[in-house]
Amino acid sequence: MAEEQAVKTISVKELTRKILDHEKVFILDARNTDDFDDWKIEGENVEVINAPYFDLLDGVESIVDKMPKEQNIYVVCAKGGSSEFVAEQLVEAGFPNAFSVEGGMKSWSEHLEPIKVGDLTGGGAIYQFVRIGKGCLSYLVESNGSCALIDTNRMLEPYEEFIKEHQLKLTHTLDTHLHADHISGGRKLAENHGAKYYLPPKDADEVQFEYNHVHDGDEYKIGDKTIKAIYSPGHTIGSTSYIVDNQYLLTGDILFIDSIGRPDLAGKAEDWVADLRETLYKRYKELADDLIVLPTHFMTHHEMNADGSVSEKLGVLFKENHGLNIESEEEFRKTVSENLPPQPNSHQEIRETNMGKITPEEEQQREMEIGPNRCAVR
């Protein structure tokens, strides 16, 4: 008797590349509908439908008419187990092109895809690590064999692999602010490499570990290039932007491509509205229009460039981003403090983890981060 053939699988890295390369992708999401409605795989050419696993235990007859015959079907669930069962059911029902997504939405949430944003003057480059399933963006600046990382995610392996592959020496890790939607890996990565970890002190009153302070106007030499800190409060009281090589403006969670940062994640919405407006409407207005804005988050795939990166010139955002064009201070206050989307999952526990107050196990950290980022005003 022939051995039963294993269900075909696809890694989240392979799936990410297909989406970023604008291939047509069909997703069958087998999670509960509430989870699907909260957060799903999306992309320019992605078609996704939801059919809960428990509805398919006795067969897939109810959905066969929705399945494409000539296209691969990528089945995803929470962790990768249920999707194998559903994919096997689809194969038996006459869809040999069904694949199970390895590791499910947990792996999707954690994948980091490095994309080169551009060259620095006279040598060096800046890379954006796109966390496509979470909407997080982190940055590696390299020059003359040295590098710095900004807003590092907790999954360190992709950064470690990149540093090793490019034979770089990590000298600095910097956070733009104390994050509330994802756990920072900056301090741990700095420890691994004997580098220095930096954090704005106004965000660090309750931090339980030693760190290097970031102040307005501070400059950091990375090889032959300079990263300059620009105090830009509003999302948090310590929020700090970084200008790299006088070309790139790393805005943290203050300014996004289609929106602006929310000031309520530390419970200080009313207190920080004026700071947010001051940063966006005065501090940033004084900067060069041709600076390329690189935020720490994106909301949807519509903010992505053709290569999957996320960026836009500051001058363009002042023309096109609604959050930068609210003339009335009262309307601005209402926009950023009322009718906000739900706060990120486990945001208080994530803040406490980033303060060093609690040290959850790795699996718990994964659970804390599951779901979309919600750092923007909608």
Image: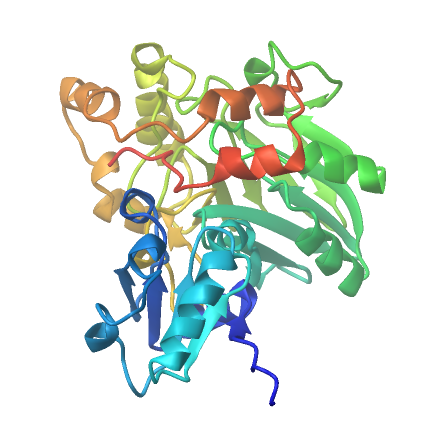
Which of the 4 image quarters holds residue 94? Answer: bottom left
Q: Report which quarter residue 49 is drawn in.
A: bottom left
Left or right: 133, with 14 as reference point: left
Q: Looking at this view, name the residue that lies furthest to the front.
A: 1
Left or right: 264, with 120 as reference point: left
Residue 285, position in %: x, y?
Answer: 35, 34
Q: Is 231 placed above or below 22 here?
A: above
Q: Residue at x 28, y 59 (%)?
A: 51
Residue 270 left/right relative to 347: left
Spot occupied by residue 248 in the image (x, y as percentages of width and height): 51, 49
Left or right of 104 in this view: 193? right
Q: Looking at the image, which is closer to me, 325 or 71?
A: 71
* Residue occupying image coordinates x 46% and y 40%: 370
137 vs 30: above or below: above
* Residue at 37% from the left image edge and 18% from the top image edge: 275
Front in this rendered view, residue 4 or 114: 4
The N terminus appears in which quarter of the rendering? bottom right
Relative image position of residue 276 (x, y in whole percent): 35, 23
In the rendered image, which quarter contains the C terminus? top left
Front-lying residue, 122 or 128:
128
x and y percent of residue 93 in the render? 33, 80
| Visible residue check, residue 166 | no
The image's colour scheme reads: rainbow
Q: Residue at image x 36%, y 46%? A: 314
